[in-house]
Image: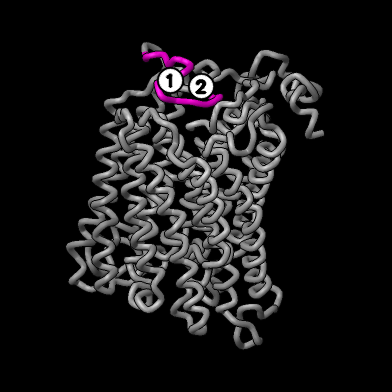
């Protein structure tokens, strides 16, 4: 079947028997969105869903930060605080960052490789519609007796087993999210492997496609591991097994091993697509080819490989053997090498380029600077002896928020600014975009930079109260968080205007950006409902700069 795809595309072939959407584009009304198998529609749905989840997760983070504005217990009781900590993480990771990247992949991967749709359009629809139900279930647990899950996003036993009625809902929701991720990942792998335009070899693919191919393999590899871990928790609680119960011969540390074997590749699942986005944006606005394209591909692949052998760096303090500590310390530090290669390549791409600083470029440069700060604090945490001081302190929170917020989320926002003219056919307001970037960048640093200091001074994570000497930095952090949240409404206004109210706005050309290269810029803006029904032919020019 795979080899027939080059001269047979979904919209005109077999889908007609089912969809009846004769050659004219989408159905009308709400059913279009429920039944759609079109990659652009599903990409849009994923992005909207992710946006709603970011909003919910953001409100949870504000509850956390309001409680931490001053020492002592202010607004909420400690149990609810723990629920907010747990749900904020689960919602942001599985409901915010990952669906946003999947939405971008849905929209852009088929357009970048010159095919008409993803290989498995029905599976794509199913993979999306699982998500709203999973999160409805997860969030509804807040209203059950005993409240929502409160064991942290890591769900460590025995703490998580103390959860009330929310426990089975949480586990089932995680299973559903895992299924959605695996189906999406298989779809992307099959599409990239089988449906590239003639002439597009693997090393001519845009870097965003490469990073997503590698991310998809990571997802397929580790989501079942998470499913196994949470199922073992479930049987421990309800079926009398003792996987993690020492009294029955189990070991709670085994859970940490299984969880982090998923958890560490997971953090790369949330950053590799960002590397692809930044490697797309920087060459466009530097008006140069990406420096070291091949080395970028190898670097991403190396990071993905290394992500499987570093998991126990989350566990330096649990009593693993010295040889284990050394192995996990050195293997973790090794990840700095390919990551450094990427950062240098981005800098080399900008070096002596004819740079202009449109909003996507600002987010990409903000990404490079701030992500690197997060990388350096990561190298500090990798040092086993030093980690004994850092572990479970706010320093860890500072570290991973620097790689997730100005890392993953900045790249997502930059990508939307970069591609929204292509999606909607109109230009966003550049002035508002710049205001949004600068205020976001300022507030993000006000939020998370002080957390390094309180962490080094010994303030623990996940606790609603703290010693009085940490007050000033916590107040700063809270002001930053509220500021950052408010600023995002500039972006919302800017994007809504593009998506819904297009009258009187500047139309976008097909090319959109002067320096943009790649197949997605060869079609009209807004992109037609069905693109590349006859696949384009990719010539012998060197690897595309995208």
**SS type, badge 2:** helix
Instruction: Provide residue 451's location: percent of width, then percent of height.
Output: 28, 62
- Is residue 154 in the magenta section? no
Q: Relative to 91, does residue 86 appear above or below in the rendering?
A: below
- 509 falls in the magenta region: yes
Viewer-proximal residue among 521 and 455: 521
Render colour scheme: one colour
Whether 70 is drawn above or below 101: the answer is below
Magenta span of residues? 505-521
Tell me whether the residue at label 2 lies in contact with that at label 1, contact meaning CB atoms closer than 8 angstroms: yes
The location of residue 487, given as percent across then percent down, is 29, 39
Vertical position of residue 323 compared to residue 89: above or below: below
Question: Residue 22 is drawn in which quadrant?
Answer: top right
The rendered magenta stretch, by its main secondary structure, is classed as loop
Q: Residues within 10 Å of mark 2 (few under 14, many from 20)?
A: some
Q: Which residue lies under the disc numbered 2?
A: 521
Label 1 crowd bin: few (<14), some (14–19), many (20+), radius 10 Å? many
Along the viewing direction, whichever of 262 and 76 lies nearer the viewer? 262
In the rendered image, the residue lying farthest to the top is: 504
Q: Secondary structure at mark 1?
A: loop
Q: Residue at x 37, y 55 (%)?
A: 401
On screen, residue 40 versus residue 272, left or right, reads: right
Say whether residue 41 is visible: no
Q: Position of residue 27 (x, y in %)?
A: 65, 20
Residue at left offset 67%, top offset 65%? 228
Q: Earlier in the sequence, mark 2 or mark 1?
A: 1
Residue for point 59% across, 48% down: 214
Residue at label 1? 512
Say which quarter of the image contains residue 75.
Answer: bottom left
- Locate residue 190: give its quadrant: top right
Q: Is residue 364 left or right of residue 423?
A: left
Residue at the spot 35% in from the left edge and 76% down from the top edge: 386
């Amino acid at each position: 079947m795979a080899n027939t795809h080059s001269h047979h595309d979904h919209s005109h072939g077999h889908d007609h028997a089912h969809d009846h959407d004769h050659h004219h584009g989408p159905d009308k009304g709400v059913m279009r969105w429920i039944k759609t198998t079109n990659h652009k529609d599903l990409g849009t749905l994923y992005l909207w869903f992710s946006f709603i989840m970011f909003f919910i997760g953001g409100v949870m983070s504000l509850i956390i930060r309001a409680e931490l504005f001053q020492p002592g217990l202010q607004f909420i009781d400690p149990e609810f605080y723990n629920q907010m900590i747990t749900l904020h993480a689960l919602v942001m990771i599985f409901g915010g960052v990952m669906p946003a990247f999947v939405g971008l992949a849905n929209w852009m991967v088929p357009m970048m490789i010159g095919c008409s749709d993803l290989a498995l359009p029905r599976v794509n629809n199913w993979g999306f519609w699982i998500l709203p139900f999973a999160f409805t279930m997860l969030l509804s647990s807040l209203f059950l007796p005993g409240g929502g899950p409160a064991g942290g996003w890591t769900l460590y036993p025995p703490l998580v087993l103390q959860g009330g009625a929310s426990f089975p809902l949480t586990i089932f929701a995680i299973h559903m999210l895992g299924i959605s991720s695996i189906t999406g990942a298989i779809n992307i792998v099959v599409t990239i492997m089988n449906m590239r335009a003639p002439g597009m070899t693997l090393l001519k693919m845009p870097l965003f496609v490469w990073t997503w191919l590698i991310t998809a393999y990571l997802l397929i590899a580790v989501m079942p591991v998470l499913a196994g871990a949470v199922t073992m928790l479930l049987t421990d609680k309800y079926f009398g097994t003792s996987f993690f119960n020492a009294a029955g011969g189990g070991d709670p540390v085994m859970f940490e091993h299984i969880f982090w074997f998923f958890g560490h590749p997971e953090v790369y699942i949330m950053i590799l697509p960002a590397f692809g986005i930044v490697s797309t944006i920087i060459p466009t606005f530097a008006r140069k080819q990406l420096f070291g394209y091949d080395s970028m591909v190898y670097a991403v692949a190396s990071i993905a490989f290394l992500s499987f052998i570093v998991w126990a760096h989350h566990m330096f303090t649990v009593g693993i053997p010295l040889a284990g500590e050394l192995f996990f310390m050195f293997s973790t530090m090794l990840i700095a090498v390919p990551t450094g290669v990427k950062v240098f390549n981005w800098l080399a791409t900008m070096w002596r380029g004819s740079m202009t600083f449109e909003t996507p470029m600002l987010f990409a440069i903000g990404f490079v600077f701030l992500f690197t700060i997060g990388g350096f604090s990561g190298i500090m945490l990798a040092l086993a002896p030093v980690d004994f001081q850092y572990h479970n302190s706010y320093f860890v929170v500072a570290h991973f928020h620097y790689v997730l917020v100005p890392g993953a989320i900045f790249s997502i926002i930059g990508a939307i600014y970069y591609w929204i003219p292509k999606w909607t056919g109109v230009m966003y307001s550049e002035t508002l975009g710049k205001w949004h970037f600068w205020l976001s960048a300022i507030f993000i640093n006000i939020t998370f930079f002080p957390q390094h200091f309180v962490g080094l001074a010994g303030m623990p994570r996940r606790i609603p109260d703290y010693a009085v000497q940490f007050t000033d930095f916590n107040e700063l952090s809270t002001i930053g968080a509220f500021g950052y949240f408010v600023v995002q409404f500039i972006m919302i206004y800017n994007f809504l205007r593009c998506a819904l109210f297009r009258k009187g706005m500047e139309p976008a050309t097909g090319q959109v950006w002067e320096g943009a290269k790649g197949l997605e810029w060869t079609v009209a803006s807004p992109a037609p409902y069905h693109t590349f029904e006859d696949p384009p032919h990719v010539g012998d020019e060197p690897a595309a700069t995208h």
